[in-house]
Amino acid sequence: MSENRQRYDVVVIGGGAAGLSGALTLSRARRSVLVIDAGSPRNAPASHAHNYLGREGVPPLELLAAGRAEAAGYGAEMVKGDAVAAEKLPDGGFRVVREDGSAVEARRLLVTTGLVDELPPVPGVAERWGRDVLHCPYCHGWEVRARPVGILAGGPMAVHQALLWRQWTDDVVLFRHTAADFGDEEYEQLAARSVAVVDGEVAALEVTGDRLTGVRLAGGTVIPREAVVVQPRFTARSGVLETLGLAPTTLEVAGQPIGSYIAADPADPAGATEVPGVWVAGNVTNPMEQVIGSAAAGLKAASAINMDLVTEDTRRAVEARRAPAVPAFSAAMERQVTERVLGDRRHGLQEM
Ligand SMILES: Cc1cc2nc3c(=O)[nH]c(=O)nc-3n(C[C@H](O)[C@H](O)[C@H](O)COP(=O)(O)OP(=O)(O)OC[C@H]3O[C@@H](n4cnc5c(N)ncnc54)[C@H](O)[C@@H]3O)c2cc1C
């Protein structure tokens, strides 16, 4: 992986589903593209990616390797590592600085750096994340269908999560942990759907061999469970965007913060940001987006970027066409030059 130019039409920062889909679209539009990717897609801890039509169950890194090869097949270049900053240049382009201090320029930026799942600090959660500690039923629900599942309450989504996961299994226990007590209506819904609620703080997850086997309460009681659902805090990987002046927006549910994202223009489904020339796609701007949706968002952003470049190229071409003709080469001057050249040649012939 290396970059061959100093200036690209588009530098894509982040080579997950969103970024690679954008790079594929742009390189097929005959744009010069560089993808800078740190190589840590969000779903890397999971063994398989689900609900990607046509590639159901594909290992996440295999899907991205295929995406890189497809984009490279149309000329996209890839470089591994972190982009750490970007600045706007006076000509409207951008300079992107990498962690090793090297820099490249781009006419436009597509930032698809994703998010970080900040996990609750319960022993066992981080170790089992993406295997039997889960958050998304569409990603993992089928794999634990009809199995004993625990929901570790971690914010305003707890009851919603319990009722949702109940679709995949009729053995759901909601651990209230440190959450505020639920309301009467919520208790009624949980009871109606046979979801048991356990009070008391969770001390740790029990792991036997390479399997989660239970949830241990602070008092020592262990409740057998084969999977535990948590509510991570979704924190946008927004460092580069912040250097461009784009601050993260707080993601709230029921008035409580559950993460952050970089807001795109709500009137523009393609992900244009407040900084002209900078687009965002995937989890960095939409924390709920899945792999296929992130890839689709990368495609949309890439199409918009290409159109923006077409518009700029057309404007420049029209300006150049309208510019007054350069007087230096009028027909009379052309005649003079021709005569002079011929004169010199004749002179040269005489000298030989
Ligand atoms: C455990 C788990 C399992 C999941 N399973 C599924 C599933 O089965 N199906 C599904 O549809 N979705 C699943 N998801 C959701 C899925 O991971 C996301 O929808 C998807 O990864 C979003 O793609 P993205 O391109 O926006 O971000 P990412 O895939 O996270 O890619 C972002 C890329 O940008 C890079 N990057 C970040 N910062 C920088 C920087 N400064 N410079 C350079 N590169 C940078 C990262 O290293 C990474 O490679 C799962 C999520 C988790 C946490």
Image: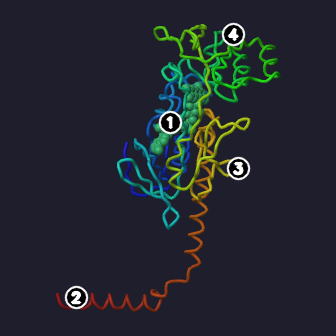
Q: Is residue 11 above or below residue 183?
A: below
Question: Which residue lies at the image location 53% right of the left edge and 16% below the top edge?
Answer: 204
Labels 2, 3: front one: 3
In three-dimensional space, the C-alpha distance between marks 2 and 1, rounded to whole angstroms, equals 63 Å
Q: Earlier in the sequence, mark 2 or mark 3?
A: 3
In the rendered image, which residue does mark 3 sit on? 266
Residue 288 x/y as whole percent: 65, 35
Q: Give the residue pinned by disc 1.
A: 67
Q: Amino acid at mark 3?
A: Pro
Label 4 CA crowd tier, 10 Å (few <14, some 14–19, many 20+): some
Tell me whether circle 1 and circle 3 mark residues in contact (CB < 8 Å). Answer: no
Picture residue at 70% right of the left edge, 30% below the top: 156
Residue 65 on image: x %, y %: 46, 33
- Distance of mark 1 from mark 3, alpha carbons? 28 Å
Q: Secondary structure at mark 2?
A: helix
Density class for disc 1 (Cα within 10 Å; few <14, some 14-19, many ≥20) is many
Camera-side residue: 311 or 182? 182
Q: Are marks 2 and 4 in contact (CB under 8 Å)?
A: no
Name which residue type carries label 2: Gly
Q: Which mark is residue 171?
A: 4
Give the residue at mark 2.
Answer: 348
Which mark is first along the chain, 4 or 1?
1
Measure the C-alpha gap from mark 2 to mark 3.
Answer: 72 Å
